[in-house]
Amino acid sequence: MARSGMRIDPSARAHVDQAINDWLQDTIGGAILADARNYVPKRSGRLAESLRAEVQRKVLRVGSLDCNYATDVEMGTAPHVILPRNKKALHWPDADHPVARVNHPGTKPSPYLRPALFQRRTA
């Protein structure tokens, strides 16, 4: 069988990949990010402001890059002991006196990323 004289532009793959990355970033990533920012508990607003969406090689990542308690909010924490790092005791505003340790009861999860991710979306 004779081969047709049709050729595909070698840069087509790069164009398609870029279109996919753009769609993931702008459409899907933007929607998930907006929902996550809407669902996240807002005490100071730091966690909501830290949320980002990024795409690299057709992989979308949504989350916080620099907020160290983001996972604790999403997943909750188990009971744990809080000890002082740099001092001999812990003290905070309205505390009656300094203490050597605090038995923290843990925190309940407040999911914001998973509900945002699992929203039904249309392409």
Image (cartoon, rainbow, N blue to C red):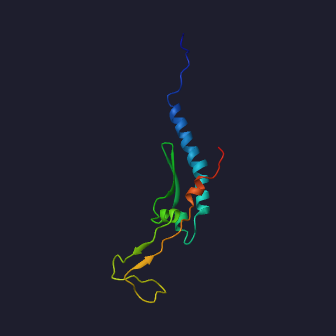
The answer to whether residue 41 is above or below residue 117 is below
Image quarter (top left, top right, bottom left or bottom right) of the C terminus: top right
Q: Position of residue 21 (x, y in %)?
A: 54, 43
Give the farthest residue toward the bottom. 96
- Residue 89 picture location, percent across and down: 36, 83
Query: Is 121 situated left or right of 108 in this image?
Result: right
Numbered-mark total: 0
- Relative to 32, does residue 44 appear above or below in the rendering? below
Furthest residue toward right: 122
Q: Residue at x 48, y 42 (%)?
A: 57
> Is residue 33 visible in this depiction of the protein?
no
Residue 29 place in picture, x, y as percent: 57, 51
Instruction: State the residue in front, 89 or 46.
Output: 89
Up the image or down, 79 lies above or below 56; here it is below
Q: Tell me the residue at 49%/87% (across/down).
A: 94
Indicate whether 71 appears above or below 30. below
Image quadrant assignment for residue 92 = bottom left
Image quarter in which the N terminus is found: top right
Residue 31 shows in the view: yes
Q: Residue at x 52, y 62 (%)?
A: 74
Residue 24 x, y percent position in the rendering: 56, 46
Q: What residue is at 50 percent from the left and 31 percent from the top?
A: 11
Looking at the image, residue 71 sits to the left or right of residue 38; the answer is left
Task: Give the quadrant of residue 112.
Answer: bottom right
Quarter holding residue 102:
bottom left
Residue that extends furthest to the top in the rendered view of this protein = 1
